[in-house]
């Protein structure tokens, strides 16, 4: 490893003691206060699990999304707070004092880490830099559809579908926006863009994993 001066910068970390999660815990419950107290108990349990085994049950429930946030945060912390960079990067040269040095490795390692951070964030729909250009128009149409035809198009159910639903003991047949001519175009445009975005995020995931494989044993300080 070749060494550099350490920088101390603000950082963002994952935390199970999240105010948003406490607020969401009370939704749909008879007592919001009791729901939040129960969630407090779960947070205590999860904190203990992280101390003992290094991960909590809540981390496993959606492991891919946990890693989507954890990996770029850790890589950012490494980039901003590391002491050195892999010595196989950059180029060795003799300085004016006749000493063989390599300080170009730092800039090269910065670029690699930046690319890894970027790719991991691109895999996450929430942090991806690319968005569906039809999102606002689609959501407006979806709200209109929901208001006119009910949740999941329940008002579009035929008598035959209603009878079949009764035989099944409840539930309902789902009807989508594209079944209504006035919403079909925006539905299709939005769907096509979503497919492109999913493909892009998949490609970013593959490249992020490839870089992780290539630099796996260099991710230390």
Image: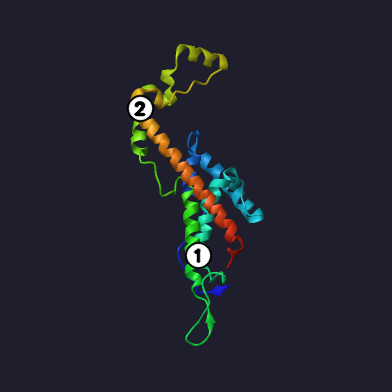
| Residue found at the far right of this picture | 52
Quarter of the image where the N terminus is located: bottom right
- Name the residue at 49% across, 15% down: 161
Q: Earlier in the sequence, mark 2 or mark 1?
A: 1
> Which one is nearer the viewer's eye here, 202 or 171?
202
**Element assignment for label 1:** helix
How many numbered circles are shown? 2
- Name the residue at 48% across, 53% down: 119
Residue 80 visible in image: no
**Element assignment for label 2:** helix
Vertical arrangement, residue 170 with respect to residue 63, above or below? above
> Which one is nearer the viewer's eye here, 149 or 28?
149
**Crowdedness near tag 1: few (<14), some (14–19) or many (≥20) residues, C-alpha within 10 Å:** many
What residue is disc 1 on?
A: 79
Mark 2, mark 1: which one is toward the viewer?
2
What residue is disc 2 on?
A: 183
Cα separation, mark 2 vs mark 1, equals 47 Å
């Amino acid at each position: 490893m070749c060494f550099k001066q350490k920088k101390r910068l603000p950082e963002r970390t994952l935390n199970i003691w999240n105010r948003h999660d406490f607020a969401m815990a009370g939704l749909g419950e008879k007592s919001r206060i009791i729901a939040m107290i129960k969630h407090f108990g779960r947070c205590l349990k999860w904190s203990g699990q992280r101390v003992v085994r290094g991960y909590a049950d809540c981390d496993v429930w959606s492991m891919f999304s946990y890693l989507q946030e954890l990996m770029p945060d850790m890589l950012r912390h490494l980039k901003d707070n590391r002491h050195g960079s892999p010595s196989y990067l950059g180029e060795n040269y003799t300085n004016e004092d006749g000493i063989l040095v390599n300080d170009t490795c730092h800039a090269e390692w910065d670029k690699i880490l930046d690319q890894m951070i970027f790719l991991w964030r691109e895999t996450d729909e929430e942090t991806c830099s690319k968005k569906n250009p039809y999102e606002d128009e689609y959501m407006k149409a979806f709200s209109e559809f929901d208001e006119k035809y009910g949740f999941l198009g329940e008002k579009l159910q035929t008598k035959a579908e209603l009878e079949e639903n009764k035989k099944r003991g409840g539930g309902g047949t789902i009807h989508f926006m594209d079944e209504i001519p006035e919403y079909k175009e925006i539905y299709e445009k939005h769907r096509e863009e979503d497919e492109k975005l999913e493909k892009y995020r998949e490609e970013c995931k593959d490249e992020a994993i490839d870089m992780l494989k290539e630099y796996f044993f260099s991710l230390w300080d």
